[in-house]
Amino acid sequence: MTVTLRRMRASDLHEVLDIERKLFPEDAWSERMFASELEQPATRYYIVADEDGTVAGYAGLSAARGDQGDVTTIAVRADRHGEGIGTAMLADLIATAAARECRDVFLEVRADNHRARLLYLRTGFSEVGVRHAYYQPSGVDAVVMRLPIPRGDEPAEAAL
């Protein structure tokens, strides 16, 4: 079986919501929240990892042409963790942010989500702040992370 990344469609929302509720039971996005994001393709970019018609994961980016992109969500079905799906989706979001001329990509991650934090650190993100009690109703802090994206006229070392 092959996993391919493609744009998320409204018809994917049933599977996306199933994954969302299992992985984030306390602060899961609603169907309306996802639908609203899909209605803004000029500034929102949502993908799924599709394996023969089944959603193995999903991810989203908020980025108009300009300085900043924000990873809004990223999730992989629990039975597919460790297969590189999250890494592939994150790389796709970063490439999209670069194509939209973003200089930086930001995200918030639960302070207690060590697997995701390691993924982001391995990808080149750095921890730049904390949003206290960001996730509700649990009150878990969010770690704010940033990845600078070098422009075509900047050396790659500028991103370190």
Image: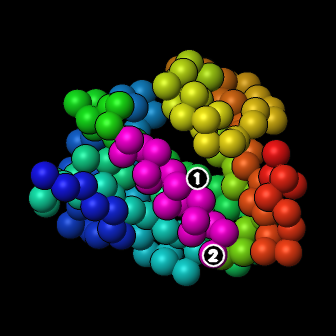
Q: Are marks 2 and 1 in contact (CB under 8 Å)?
A: no
| Residue at image location 80% in from the left, 70% down from the top | 151
Q: Could you tell me residue 29's position as x and y percent?
A: 41, 46
The C terminus is located in which quarter?
top right
Say which residue label 2 marks. 99
Say which residue label 1 marks. 71
Q: CA distance from mark 2 to mark 1?
A: 15 Å
| Residue at image location 52% in from the left, 55% down from the top | 91
| In the image, residue 116 above or below residue 17 | above
Disc 2 is placed on an element classified as helix
Place residue 144 in its image quadrant.
top right
The verdict on residue 94 being magenta is: yes
| In the image, residue 117 above or below residue 14 | above
Q: Could you tell me residue 68's position as x and y percent?
A: 75, 63
Q: Main secondary structure of the magenta part?
A: helix
Q: Amino acid at mark 2?
A: Ala
Q: Which residues are magenta?
A: 84-99
66 or 87: nearer the viewer? 87
Estimate how packed mark 2 is, as few (under 14), some (14 to 19) or many (20 or more) residues with alpha carbons within 10 Å: few
